[in-house]
Amino acid sequence: MTKTVTKAGNIKYALSGDDDFVAVVEDGETFDVECAININDGVLTHVGQQLTKDDVTLPFVSGGTGPIEVAGAKPGDMLTIDILDMRLNGLGFTALWPGIGIFPDWVRRKEFGLQSRVVEVSDGVVHWSDKVKLPIKPMIGVAAVAPVHGSVLTVDNGVHGGNLDIQEVAPGNSIMFRVVRDGAHVFLGDCHAIQGDGEVNGMGAIEIAADLTVRVKLSPAPERLTWPRIETPTHICTTGCARPLEDAMRIAFEEMVYWMDESYGIPQPEGYMLLGQIAEARCTQMVNPKYTYICKVSKELLKQFTD
């Protein structure tokens, strides 16, 4: 029977290497993780519900289930999390929340006022309205290991991961972290049924509870692995989080130059020039304390350097 890490009592709103583990998994083990909706369970009750300001308590949002101990994980390891499956709850929501989003009127908090849309998610689609159906693209918003020191709120992000909100953190793909604390301290949560680039309206995805099936693997960390990396069947992907936005982009591109150098033997000057021709890059969210940027390179193109 597959081990299940339950969400009951195990949702954290700060990511830390100092909390007690809620479960232990072995290197190579496959297990399930229950994830609560980003404003916690029990808030959504029916399609068409209008949320109120009492339903959300900032910054206690985007909680992660954990920390989960990976037995034997040590600083200097790389932890790979293979995302095998996501099973979505039947209700999700998105919202305009004054003060949150890419157009925040931060003094008066007025904008369009508080507006929410609670929707049914079933049969592979988000039922936006009676007429409009959006094909689901499930993803994990919060994926993390412990930071090197102290704690980081789940609404934030950094080299440890956290609230990355990257659509490629999805079934069929893998995300990789540098371990900096014994046991790694894995957190997963803030799942989305679908999210547009930029997550522009703040609560900009179809936020939803989900059950995950994942597998963890340990290996020696590449020397220049700093920020989380993602691998898909077709691409290698690097990430960066910062403000201003261009700094997040620079980090993601720098990390890609390092990866192409160490894994494909492409000298850094050539790799930098090559990215000018082949990089696929975008901002995945610009509503968290630090923006997220992803840089992607096709594996098919990179094979030419190793064949």
Image: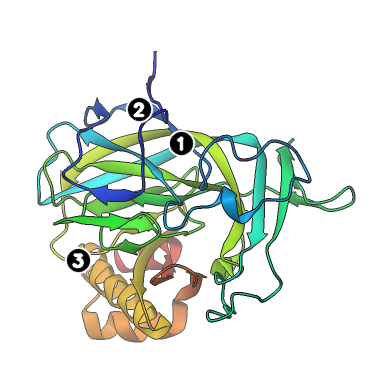
* Nearer the observer, 46 or 66: 46
Crowd tier of the residue under label 2, counting other residues whose Cα lies within 10 Å: few below 14, some 14–19, many 20 or above: some
Kind of residue sitting beneath label 3: Glu
> Label 1 belongs to which residue?
84
Asked if the residue under mark 2 is in contact with the one under mark 1, i.e. CB atoms within 8 Å, the reply is yes
Asked if the residue under mark 3 is in contact with the one under mark 1, i.e. CB atoms within 8 Å, the reply is no
* Nearer the observer, 29 or 66: 66
Q: Secondary structure at mark 2?
A: strand
> Label 2 belongs to which residue?
30
* Location of residue 116 in the rendering, given as x and y in whole percent from the top left corner: 70, 56
- The residue lying at 73 percent from left, 50 percent from top is 50
Q: Quadrant of the N terminus?
A: top left
- The residue lying at 31 percent from left, 68 percent from top is 305
Q: CA distance from mark 3 to mark 2?
A: 29 Å
User: Which of the 4 image quadrants contains residue 120?
Assistant: top right
Q: CA distance from mark 1 to mark 2?
A: 9 Å
> Label 3 belongs to which residue?
262
Residue ranking furthest to the right: 131
